[in-house]
Structure formats: structure tokens, C-alpha cells
Image: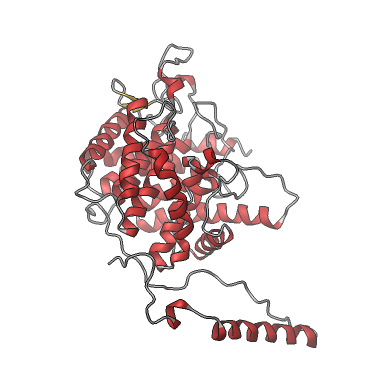
Amino acid sequence: MKYILPLLLAWLPTATAQSVPSRDAVMAVVTREASAEVARLKNLDAHPDLPRDNVTGLTANWVSGVFLVGAARLTDTPDVHEYVVRTAAKFNYALAGAEAPVNLINANNITLGDVYEDLYQRTGQPGMLMPLQQRLDYTLPYLTQAPAPKRLAWWWCDALFMAPAVYARMSALTGDPKYLQAMDVAWWRTYDRLWDTDEHLYARDERFITERDAAGKKIMWSRGEGWVIAGLARVLEAMPADFPSRPRYVRLYQEMAARLIALQGEDGLWRSSLLDPQAFPEAETSGTALETYGLAFGINHGLIDRQTYLPHVLKAWAGLNRYILPNGLLGQVQTTGDQPVPTRPDYVGMYASGPFIMAGLEIARFNDPVTPLPVAVTVGHGEPMTMAPRIAQPGQNASAFEQSEAKRKVQERAATKALAYDPVTDDPDYRSPYPARP
């Protein structure tokens, strides 16, 4: 039965795909997706005996990171917001990859930095940014080696979603252009290696420049192109208007957008193999979610023509909604990998949930005026966000000892606050290590 429902839903008519849905309707779907993912992760935490791996469980890798990037934007959804904040604190605002230097520069391990930047931007708490900045500083020489090395740090197109926006946003938050400048060098080196000037798309990596499928066609992977156009959107959101190569990013975004709508399926989804849709004719939602987000972002920020692109985005959104499973999660997701493969109706993935949330948030803004780019960066001023460990309250039948312990813990916390040296309040010359941003 779990396989039948999504297949039946896929045959529902799409006549309403041209109507802009209400903000409330979109947000109901988005918050349900996010809450369902959080509930699934919490259930794994509560039951250590359940099977899990680096794809299904919470880790600091890209799989979890992509979901958290989307979830971090749902500040008005308490269960999701609390989970994001507690996860960031659990990871100490740090990134994975300590096993070897190659992992320290791996773009997949940079993804979570976007979440820490988001939290810092809302609070101004420097500890949320320091570990990330140290890590990015380590990577800069490897992104800008001259001449370009034979093997690049960002050698696969997925990397253009995972890391570049983190660098662009770090420059916006700190006022230091070196992160954006290094990102710019690395981005166009990847472009030079992987961009197909005939197809106006990216090869996933250098293997696929010459590789062909069984029908003799180039292998242009939907999720790979989705990573790139979504990455472009995130970079353009933070890149200054006067950055020298910004027009080149805009042209690349527009070129990809035009190519993608020409390859969209009648049901609104992009097939896993874009140039040979019959190779894997079943629906695939992770690439479609990324492409939907990337295009919707462009409409909302005036990068592409609304009249031309809106029908395509609405059709894609309607198509994605036909693959939401009864538990609230997006189904028909391709497994982790590097190229087109068959999909299953019941397969889900955090790397699809995150882009689905991001796409929905953009679609929810379709009735708002166009927002010029770049989006202004403002930073909070020390607002508390890190959640202190909960003190369990004694129940009705608590013993006298339990009641006494609860009272003592409250007093201990109050004493810690009263007696500990706090640079912000006790140092008259205290200045944040990061310049104030308006």
C-alpha cells in the first residue's frame, strides 16, 4: 500500500498548477515536512537500537546539513527551530572532517556553516561564528593556488551548493572580502572544468564529460544541475552588488534557468537523467526540489521573468506535492550518489527535505513584491539563543531529596550567572571580534 498511494497521486490532474497557492497552504506543507523530519530524527535519538547510518541519522555531514540549512529558516516553527538550535550547540558550531586534511577542505563538510552563520546573524554571538571562520581560513590557500592544481578542491558540481554561499556570507558578516574572493576563484575553476557550452549544463565531474549512457547520450544529472542553480541563488543572495564578477554569475544563472525549463517533464518534475528521460522514466524529487527552489528564488528577486517562469515553478511545486507520503515526508527521492539511478516511491532523504522547505518558502512569497539583490545583512546584538540544559522539575510524588536537588540546581545556575566573569558586561573596553553590521 505504501507504494500505491504515491503512484495514484502522480496521476492526479495538474490543472491547478497555474494558480499561485496561498502562503498559508504552502507553509502548512513546508512545516509538516520539517516537523516530520525532526520527529524522525528525534525518534532515532530516543531509540539507539534502531538502524541508522550517515544518510538516515543526524551527523555533521552534508546530508543532515542540507536539511538543516532549510530548517534553520523556519524560525516560527518551534519544534523545528529548537531542534536546529540544539543541534548547532551539540556540534559546538563546528564542522566535520578532522580525520584528514582532505576532509577539512571537502565542500560537503562545509555545508553546516550556513546554519551557524544564520544563527550568528540573528544573535551576534561570536562563538557561533569563530569555529567556522577558523575552518574557512584553513581552506583559503587550497581554493586559490596559482596556477590551478590538476586536482581541484571543488571538483564535482554538488560542491557549488555545499560551500560557496558559506564563503560569500562570511564576507558579508565579517566585512572581510577574502572569503568571497577565494570562492570566486574556486567557482570559476570548477566552471572551466565542468561546464558544457553546448548543453548549458554542468557535468557532474570530469568522468562524465566523455561518458555516455546506453543510448549514447550525455549524462546530465538532474540533482547535480539542481545543486548548481540552487547554489547560484544562495551566492547571489549574499554577493555585493558591485562585486566585479557578479554579472557573470547572473548570466550563468539565467542560462541554466532557460535550459532547465526546456527539459521539465509534463508532470512538472525533472527526470533524473535530463537529456535521456526515458532512461529513468520514474519521478525523482530531490533534483526537482532544488531546481524549484533555484527558479522560485530568481522570480522573487527579479533575476528571471516572472511571466515566463512562474508556470514552470508552479507546475513543479504541484508535482512535488503529489509525492508527499502519508507521514509528511517527500518521497520518490533518489539515493545518495553521483549520477542518475532508479527511484522508489517510499525513499526519502534529508537532502530532499531541505530543498523542499527552501522551495516552499520562496513560493510562499510569490504574492510579495520583488526583493532586490543582494539581501541586506543585519546582525543581532547579543540576543540569547543557545538553550541552557533543562532542569527537570520534580513531579507531584517527588521525594524530599528530589525536590531539594531541583531547588539546588536552580540556585547553582543563578550563582554561576552572578559570579562568572562576563566580558560583555565586565570589560568596559569589550568589543565583539566581528565588526558591527547594520
Above or below, 10 relative to 275: below
Q: Is residue 111 above or below residue 176?
A: above
The answer to whether one can see residue 8 in this image is yes
Residue under the point 37% across and 73% down:
431
Q: Does residue 436 appear to the left or right of 328 in the view shown?
A: left
Considering the image in quadrants, where does the N terminus appear? top right
Locate residue 320, reporting x and y percent.
44, 41
Colour scheme: secondary structure
Quadrant of the rendering where the C terminus is positioned: bottom left
Measuring from the top left, give residue 10's x and y in whole percent.
Answer: 48, 35
Tell me the residue at 68%/86% (across/down).
407
Front residue of 94/210: it is: 94
Residue at 50% over, 66% down: 78
Towards the viewer: 380 or 421: 421
| Front in this rendered view, residue 186 or 66 | 186
User: In front: 183, or 401?
Assistant: 183
